[in-house]
Image (tube, rainbow, N blue to C red):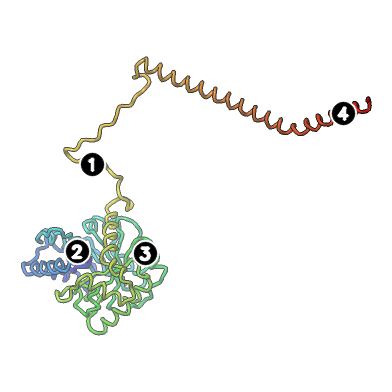
Amino acid sequence: MFFDLNFPVHHPQHSAAQNVSKKNKGKQPQQPNDVSYSPAQLSAIETRLDLLVHLGYTVIALNQTVQSVVNPKSHVNILDPLLAQLRPRQGIVLLKRLTIVLDQDSEKGFGLTPANAALFKPYDLISLVPTTLATFSLACLTHSQPSALTAHIISLPLTLRLDFRLKHTLVRTALKHGVVFEITYVGALGGENDTTLTDAGAAESGALAKRNWWATAKEVTRVTKGKGLIISSGVVAEADFRAAKDVANLVTLLGLPQEASHSATTKIPKSLVLRAQTRQTYRAVFSDPVLVIPEGATPAAQPPATTSESMPAPAQAKVAGNGNEKKRAREEDGEDGAAASSSKNKNSNNAGTGPNSNAEGSSRKKKRKKNNQEAQ
């Protein structure tokens, strides 16, 4: 079972609403709740999904990207209408993921608050893309703690040259809270990134971006020590998709062992998805287990409990007799034990006085013999 938790879904009308200039900040118009995809867009998405399934991926997360702030007045969930229009695939699990690009405007807040919990509840995964040191600290310390708004994925902009250092204390705290760091392999191939990330300044293309990807990805691997890493695609063009084993071989060039590279697309994403389900429960704890008996199954019959009142009189007398007999046997055993101990003591006393008595008898015989000789 292979996982790809970054399948970008791009909607032109929605992205146009997100790219608002700073002059009109806070005055963006509301978007209609009904999002419709054209046949050409649906065909392109279906083709990319078929290619991922052909490459062996079974769990795919559709990714919606939002820039700076999640505004409850203008935010629209574009994944629910898409899932309703996609053709079902047997054995394939499609998840919904929301990615928020954090920039300087996000340092004062980006909408991930309990007041907006209803907006984030439909999403299975929440990811953050910090681009500054302040937003990176917020992602590692504040938004990684277990809650209904926990962000389980931190995806660094690997194609950019980071303006801040990845501190060990921040990374260790995030890993302790269960957060994973994502590495998208599209930057290593020099492929096309999501247009929303590019417009937000969180991704670049070209030879310089490819060189930045290798340097930043090695730094992420070094700081995390290969723990808590997942590998995703983030691919927009069909030619940039790679099979899971090819991706594992590519990531080994970053210094990861082969086993860790394989786990980055299998075990770690699986545990992440299971842990992300705790966002739907109170204080991020699963509910108490409930025993559900399937229809048609009968529970095993338990033997009735027997009491002294329900037993007949002869049986009660027999039980009482057995108790008295056992008590008498114990008393007899105690008497036999006392007698045996006294006999042992006597034997020990006799054994201790035996040599003295023999010496006295021999001295008396010698005196008698001496007296007899004198009398003669």
Q: Quote the CA–CA distance across marks 2 and 3.
A: 23 Å
Q: Which mark is residue 369?
A: 4
Label 2, residues with CA under 10 Å away: few <14, some 14-19, many ≥20: many
- In the rendered image, residue 37, in percent from the top left (x then y), is placed at 9, 65
Tell me the mark number nearer the camera, choosing from 4 and 3.
4
Q: Are marks 2 and 3 in contact (CB under 8 Å)?
A: no
Residue type highlighted by circle 2 = Ile
Which secondary structure, mark 3? helix
Q: Are marks 4 and 1 in contact (CB under 8 Å)?
A: no
Residue type highlighted by circle 3 = Leu
Is residue 278 positioned above or below 158 on the image?
A: above
Q: Are marks 1 and 3 in contact (CB under 8 Å)?
A: no
Q: Is residue 129 visible?
A: no
- In the rendered image, residue 130, in percent from the top left (x then y), is placed at 31, 70
Q: Residue furthest top?
A: 313
Q: Which mark is residue 145?
A: none
